[in-house]
Image (tube, rainbow, N blue to C red):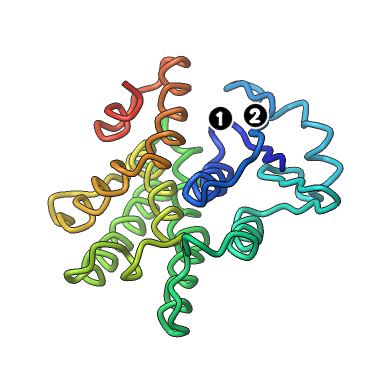
Amino acid sequence: MKLYSGPLSMFGAKAEIAAHEKGLDFELIMVPFEMKTLYQPKHPEVLRINPKRQVPVLIDGDLEIFDSTQIFEYFETIKPVPALWPAEPKARARARLLEHKSDEVYFPPIVRLMGLQATPDDPAAVEARAAALAFYDDMERAMGDKEWLAGSYSYADIAFYMAQIFGDRMGAPMTDAHPKLQAWRDRMSARPAVRKVAGAMGRYLLSQGRKLPVFLAKLAA
């Protein structure tokens, strides 16, 4: 099994953490990446398999798939224990929705912030930070007394944790209004699979002279 990812791929990191959590035996292949040119030139296997020309890509024998969620669903099928989706149907549906919202509701404003780092007062940047803050507010209310986002530890936790790393780095951090989420993030950071993957990403960022959020700097040490 080969997993193609990149040193700053949030989606690749999601798949990698899930693979480690499940104890899968795989070869991690980091595709070439530079801060100025990003993923150019594209890795030939990524180009061949994914029409979107992006990591992550998974090859397992004659199976070739892409997209972090599709890759995770394959992991969950071939290695159902430990489970990373809840067993109860409604709980599973809620966990899947949370994972989807992390990717498709929370993360797009963070992507917008990536291109607005030099103009933090731009109305688009202000709006993007407000969207992230509103998402945190909703998640804080939804946490209740749960240890994990969907009750039991799941892929939803992995997805939001990795997305929030980028949110914090791009100027949309959690605040004092989110103590439950911050405690959840500390629990995530303590998991060996998360420490391994997020720590490696943090060390790469440090090697490029980039500043890290405090919680990520601890993992990169």
* N-terminal label among 1 and 2: 1
Report the amino acid beneath label 2: Met
Mark 1 — residue?
A: 7
Task: Locate residue 198: give its quadrant.
Answer: top left
145 or 140, nearer to the observer:
145
The residue under label 1 is which amino acid type? Pro
Residue in the picture at 43% in, 82% down: 88
Residue 119 on image: x %, y %: 40, 35
Q: Tell me how many marks there are.
A: 2
* Nearer to me, 43 or 25: 25
| Residue occupying image coordinates x 35% and y 55% | 132
Label 1 secondary element: loop
Q: Residue at x 37, y 39 (%)?
A: 192
Position of residue 191 in the picture relative to residue 61 (left or right): left
Q: Is residue 206 above or below residue 90?
A: above
Question: Vertical placement of 180 versus 93: above or below?
Answer: above
**Image coordinates for residue 123, horizontal then vertical, percent:** 38, 49
Q: Is residue 44 above or below residue 18?
A: above
Q: Which residue is mark 2?
A: 30
Q: Position of residue 152 (x, y in %)?
A: 34, 67
